[in-house]
Image: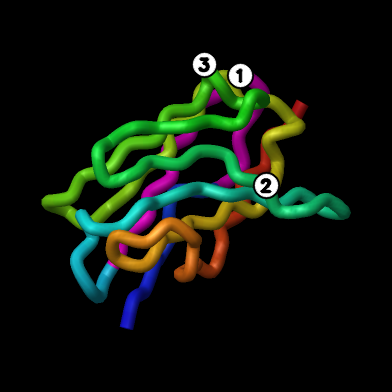
């Protein structure tokens, strides 16, 4: 059974930085694509950043140059470093993982709140 658990969220001010972590258990982490999604109140869930098995990354336009996704396969953990945070980054952030060698996200964390005050 695959389990994803986020940590590192909280309340910060505009311009601050925050690092989210997502610890995975079950299966072989290095075989999964991983992503970070977010959902703000009244909005649809959106993909913020993703990282595939090769380490190649992809970002939403709204976070390019500010957010960095990375993974540590030795620790079965994926990170999201968020810099220069803005109030519009306020959302519940979700960690997601694909099936081993798969493409679609099938596994989800419970979500963690990030609030950026102006």
Q: Which residue sits furthest front?
A: 102
Image check: 59 left or right of 46?
left
Q: What residue is at 36 percent from the left and 52 percent from the top?
A: 33
Dot 2 crowding, Cα within 10 Å, few <14, some 14–19, many 20+: some
Q: Are marks 1 and 2 in contact (CB under 8 Å)?
A: no
In this image, 12 relative to 71: left or right? Answer: right
Residue 14 or residue 89, whichever sits in front: 89
Q: Which mark is residue 23?
A: none
Judging by the rendered image, the residue that carries numbered circle 2 is: 46
Q: Residue 73 lies in magenta, yes or no?
A: no
Label 1 crowd bin: few (<14), some (14–19), many (20+), radius 10 Å: some
Which of the marked residues, 1 or 2, is nearer the chain's N terminus?
A: 1
Q: Image height check: is 45 above or below 18?
A: below
Q: Quadrant of the C terminus?
A: top right
User: Quick check: 81 above or below 27?
Assistant: above
Q: Is residue 12 left or right of residue 30?
A: right
Mark before the other along the chain sequence, 3 or 1:
1
Q: Residue furthest left?
A: 74
Q: For residue 19: magenta?
A: yes
Please give the range of residues in magenta: 10-24
Which residue has dot 1 on it?
15
- Image point 49% across, 62% down: which residue? 105
x and y percentages locating residue 16 in the rendered image:
55, 24
Q: Are marks 3 and 1 in contact (CB under 8 Å)?
A: no
Residue furthest toward the right? 42
Q: Main secondary structure of the magenta part?
A: strand
Report the residue at 26% width, 71% height from top: 25
Question: According to the image, label 3 marks what residue?
Answer: 65
């Amino acid at each position: 059974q695959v389990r994803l658990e986020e940590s590192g969220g909280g309340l910060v001010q505009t311009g601050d930085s925050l690092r989210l972590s997502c610890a995975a258990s079950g299966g072989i982490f290095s075989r999964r694509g991983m992503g970070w999604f977010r959902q703000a109140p009244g909005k649809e869930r959106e993909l913020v950043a993703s990282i595939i098995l090769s380490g190649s990354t992809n970002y939403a336009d709204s976070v390019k140059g500010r957010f960095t996704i990375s993974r540590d396969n030795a620790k079965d953990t994926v990170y999201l470093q968020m810099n220069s945070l803005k109030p519009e980054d306020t959302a519940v952030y979700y960690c997601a993982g694909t099936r081993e060698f798969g493409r679609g996200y099938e596994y989800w964390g419970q979500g963690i709140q990030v609030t950026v005050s102006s």
